[in-house]
Image (cartoon, rainbow, N blue to C red):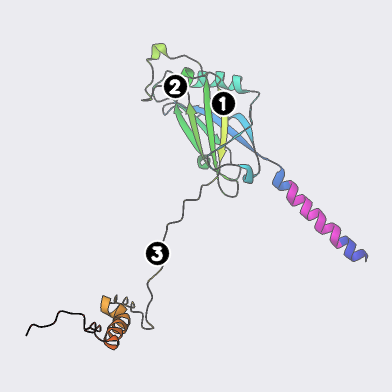
Amino acid sequence: MRLALHSFVALWLCFVSRAYAQDVPTQLYIRHRVVHPNLPVTPWSNLGSISIPHLSSISPSGTPVTFTPAETLLDDLSEFAESVDPALEESLYQVAVEKPKLSEGMWPASVMKGCLMPMSTSSSITVHLSSSGEPLGLDYFLSSIPRNGSCPSPSETSKSYSMHNTTVFVTTPRSPPLPGLRAPPPLTPEGAPIPPVAEKTFLQKYWVYIVIAVAALLISGPPEEPAANGNGPKASN
């Protein structure tokens, strides 16, 4: 009896722990930095964190999640401006999702021109997740920038990186529609296709009804002639 009770309690605790693990959101950290090909590489800084809900509640078209900016965000942006001037040509702003088990070069990342950062006040991040919840890719977009992506003149470019109002979305894989396939043709035991049955002609389809109709006409015979009566005109002598 005690052994059965202990087994039941162990199974119940295992079920509860799994259900709780599925409902607890996953925490992901977004990193950012500025780089220039002719300057030393700056280390990644914490941009903020997001909470990923259960995968069943995420839409393939994108589900908004809560984004918590880092407390040191303003200080990091000031350090970025000291390291790489946004007005410099080929300055780049990078955003990535941290994956502790992989090297920094393998993190899903997105790149934006550094000169475009001071022009915008809002941005959006889309994190693409696998079917198991692993981040696979990241898209970073800015609002209020030229369609051709050209930088303003250096004299018009601000010397600092502005703090944006950031919105984050997460997406899951979308299954493509299955193709409509026709049924394979029937084959003979030797593997050759069975030729289709030839369509019957009109006589082959309805010869029975034609024979019955002709037989009925022959059996009925010709129509009877009306009998002569004596009321007709007599012949003259």
Residue 182 is marked as 3
Depth check: give the residue in front, 237 or 43: 237
Q: Earlier in the sequence, mark 1 or mark 3?
A: 1
Residue 177, position in %: x, y? 46, 52
| Quadrant of image for the C terminus | bottom left
Depth check: give the residue in front, 214 or 222: 222
Asked if the residues shown at circle 2 and circle 3 are in contact, with their CB atoms under 8 angstroms apart, the answer is no
Which residue reaches farthest bottom? 219
- Residue at image position (18%, 79%) is 232
Which residue reaches farthest left? 237
Task: Please name which of the two marks, 2 or 3, marks the residue nearer to the observer.
Answer: 3
**Left or right of 141, for residue 208:** left
One can see residue 140 in this view: yes
- Residue at image position (51%, 16%) is 160
* Real-space CA distance between mark 2 and mark 1, rounded to the nearest whole angstrom: 15 Å
Is disc 1 surrounded by few (<14), some (14 to 19) or many (20+) residues within 10 Å?
Answer: some
Q: Secondary structure at mark 2?
A: helix
User: What's the amino acid at mark 2?
Assistant: Leu
* Real-space CA distance between mark 1 and mark 3, rounded to the nearest whole angstrom: 49 Å
Residue 105, position in %: x, y? 50, 40
Q: Which residue is mark 1?
A: 166
Q: Which residue is mark 2?
A: 116
User: What's the amino acid at mark 1?
Assistant: Thr
Q: Earlier in the sequence, mark 2 or mark 3?
A: 2
